Image (cartoon, rainbow, N blue to C red):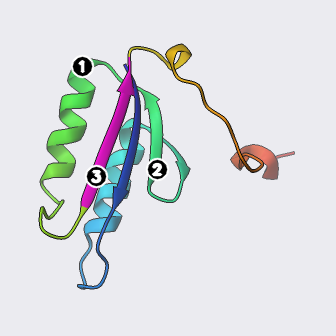
Amino acid sequence: MYIILVYDINTEQKSNVANRVFKICKKYLVHIQNSVFEGELNESQFINLKNEIKKYLRKDLDSCIVFYSRNEKWLNKEFITEPKDDTSCFL
């Protein structure tokens, strides 16, 4: 399945939650924007991802939303601005 994961971590309270959630998401998905990841996962990878980030997300402070479809081809994506190209710094 194709996943788009979006999170909002409350940083008013000093914690390491945002950093930990970022690292876990980056392990499974591609980082496309601040707090937004996407990628193709199988069912077990998706379950592992959810279980790992649930350990750190605080239900009363943080938010995490996952959009998914069967495949990337079933998802229309449109860039309103120029897409970031992280590889553009390589020659």
Quarter of the rendering occupied by the C terminus? top right
Q: Residue at x 29, y 61 (%)?
A: 20
Q: Nearer the viewer, mark 1 or mark 3?
A: 3
Q: Quadrant of residue 48?
A: top left
Query: Which amino acid, mark 2?
Result: Val
Left or right? Give the position of 76 relative to 3.
right
Q: Residue at x 71, y 49 (%)?
A: 84
- Counting from the top left corner in percent of width and height, residue 73 is at 55, 14
Q: Secondary structure at mark 3?
A: strand
Residue at mark 3 to residue at mark 2: CA–CA distance: 10 Å
Number of numbered markers: 3
Q: Tell me the crowding category of disc 1: few under 14, some 14 to 19, or many 20 or more residues within 10 angstroms, Cα based.
A: few
- Considering depth in this image, is 91 or 8 the residue closer to the camera? 8
Q: Is residue 68 magenta?
A: yes
Q: Identify the mark nearer the N-term, 3 or 2.
A: 2
Q: Identify the mark nearer the N-term, 1 or 2.
A: 2
Query: Which amino acid, mark 1?
Result: Glu
- The residue to which callout 1 is attached is 43
- Magenta part, dominant SS: strand
- The residue to which callout 3 is attached is 64
- Counting from the top left corner in percent of width and height, residue 9 is at 31, 67
- Counting from the top left corner in percent of width and height, residue 11 is at 31, 78
- The residue to which callout 2 is attached is 36
The range drawn in magenta is: 63-69
Quarter of the rendering occupied by the N terminus? top left
